Amino acid sequence: MKVITGVTPKETLEISELCGREPDVSLIRVNGAVHAIRDMGEVAFIILRKREELLQCVYEENVSEFDLKDIREGATVEFAGRVNREERAPHGVEIRIRTARILSEPAEPMPLQISRRKLNTSLEAKLNNRAVSLRNIQERAKFRIQEGITRGFRDFLYSQGFTEIHTPKLGAKSAEGGANLFRLEYFHRPAILQQSPQFYKQMMVGVFDRVFETGPVFRAEKHNTKRHLNEYTSLDFEMGYIDGFEEIMGMVTGFLQYTMDLLNREYAAELEILGIQTPQTDEIPQVRFDEAKQMVAEKYNRQFRNPFDLEPEEEQLIGRLFQEE
């Protein structure tokens, strides 16, 4: 009887494995999707899109044992070739192709030019062709940054003794006020989509002292601004045995410091693609709520209105004021 003993090693190599490999005469195998083809005549560059990044492969006339015309953008292929050091190539490495095996071909030409650095098309066109548009390097980089932020949140809170929980998203009542609810029928009974895991977090603090969740929450609000989304991933934590809210501020600061360091260290390529510079989090200013409102009122000549809440414009101006000063 055959048994499975774990993950089966792959014969094809990934970019990280190629970068640590010394050039030699032996043939290695790589696979991926054809992201772009740049035909230079006797030589052509075939750019493969892999799960990590882009890999440059070189077709050479009378050396590569296939016809370049058989390779189409959007196809998935497996190449056999030699590793070559090339400073101008991404990661300083390229594959000199000997043979090619076509794994699949697109049924029709791509509806979008995903090989461009930026998709210069409308949001509607991107969404109507979402499975294709997400293959653009800039589009998919956003998901990597999202992963890095969620990963930073999880890893940091694990290191601080938190337990991860997973709370129901269907409920009978709302967890907190101030948000409109999505209402639905649950087996002939009224129900709602949860807009916060607040109740569950508070219950679980009595079990584990420190808990957190990364999960979707739902708000029945028009999302025509940057401040409102119908569905988003919420990073929630709750902790007991605290001496004051300053401990919560310290935990949030620690999470931001850990996450920004993680992004700069392991997601530098995506940050560069998107033109993002992470904020400095070594020292974050702290100021009393009423003093912040007063400072904004004085500097930007605003009327000090509600002393118990922040208006959206006030939030933006507080950020602007502390960035300037």
Image: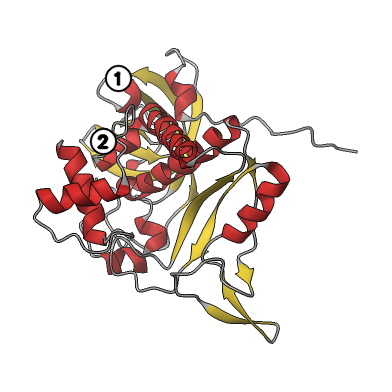
Q: Residue at x 84, y 37 (%)?
A: 3
Q: Position of residue 198 (x, y in %)?
A: 57, 58
In which quarter of the view is residue 85 placed?
Answer: top left
The circle drawn on residue 86 is 1
**94 or 236, nearer to the observer:** 236
The residue lying furthest to the bottom in this view is: 188
The answer to whether residue 157 is seen in the rendering is yes
SS at mark 1 in the image: loop
Asked which colour scheme the image uses, the reply is secondary structure
Of residues 113 and 138, the one nearer the viewer is: 138
Distance, label 1 to label 2, CA atoms, is 28 Å
Residue in view at x 51 percent, y 62 percent: 217
Q: Amino acid at mark 1?
A: Glu
Label 2 sits on a secondary structure element that is loop
Task: Decide: is 240 above or below 12.
Answer: below
Residue 147 percent across, percent down from the top left: 46, 43
From the viewer's perspective, is 51 left or right of 113? Answer: right
Q: Residues within 10 Å of mark 2 (few under 14, many from 20)?
A: few
Q: Amino acid at mark 2?
A: Gln
Which is more foreground, mark 1 or mark 2? 2
Q: Position of residue 312 (x, y in %)?
A: 26, 60
Q: Residue at x 10, y 48 (%)?
A: 299
Residue topped by disc 2: 277
Q: Quadrant of the C terminus?
A: top left
Answer whether residue 71 is visible to the viewer in this image. no
In-image side of 189 versus 293 (left or right): right
Quarter the N terminus occupies: top right
Q: Nearer the viewer, residue 163 or 305?
A: 305
The mark that comes first in sequence, 1 or 2, is: 1
| Contact, mark 1 vs mark 2 (Cβ under 8 Å) | no
Whether residue 270 is situated above or below residue 291 in the rendered picture: above
